[in-house]
Amino acid sequence: MAIDQKEKTDLTKPKPLVFRDNPEVKKKIEAHKKANPDDVTYYTRLVKENPERAIETFLYRDQQKHESEMRLIMKQLPQATAFYHAQTAEAKARIDRDLEGINPYFKDKAFVNAALREKDRQTRREFANPATTPATPPPAAAARVAA
């Protein structure tokens, strides 16, 4: 499930919640409920009897997921920074545009993702214009020629 990383600007009147209905996800949830009836009872009581604690539980899970993702992002950040500094002004501008309005809490993650999108864009452009890239046979083809 994607998280909207842009800062919210219009908080005057909240829109009604809209829920998606995904049959595959429902099947997984139903299977988990059958396998873990005690969890169903616990969470049902938690929401009814202590909604504040239920909110904190869900937020804590989101925070744990964020921390897990950030461990990977912190490993990728030095390479993304080096990639960014090696880019042309146009590429840097595209990356900077992607980062406009991003919540500081998500800034590093958004930066790494923007750098990856730019690298992917450049790679796709190279594949689209094979005449501009040096022609080197794949390793398996080179091994057959040498044999």
Image (cartoon, rainbow, N blue to C red):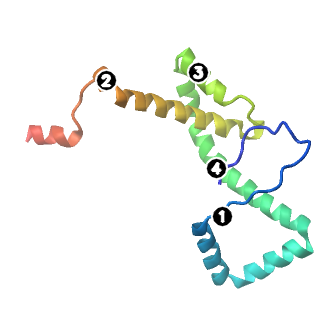
- Mark 4 and mark 3 residues within 8 Å of each other at the beta carbon: no
- Please tell me whether mark 3 or mark 1 is closer to you in this view: 1
Q: Amino acid at mark 1?
A: Asp
List the residue tagged with mark 3: 92
Residue 32 in view:
yes
List the residue tagged with mark 1: 21
Q: Earlier in the sequence, mark 3 or mark 1?
A: 1
Left or right of 62? Residue 72 is left
Q: Amino acid at mark 4?
A: Glu
Q: Which mark is residue 69?
A: 4
- Please tell me whether mark 4 or mark 3 is closer to you in this view: 3
Residue 103's x, y, as percent?
77, 37
Q: Earlier in the sequence, mark 4 or mark 3?
A: 4
Classify 10 Å Cα crowding around label 4: few (below 14), some (14-19), many (20 and above): few
Left or right of 7? Residue 83 is left
- Mark 3 and mark 1 residues within 8 Å of each other at the beta carbon: no
Q: Quadrant of residue 127?
A: top left
Alpha carbon separation for disc pair 4 and 2: 35 Å
Alpha carbon separation for disc pair 2 and 3: 22 Å
Where does the N terminus fall, quadrant-wise?
Answer: bottom right
Alpha carbon separation for disc pair 4 and 3: 24 Å
Q: Amino acid at mark 3?
A: Lys
List the residue tagged with mark 2: 133
Q: Identify the secondary structure beneath mark 3.
A: helix
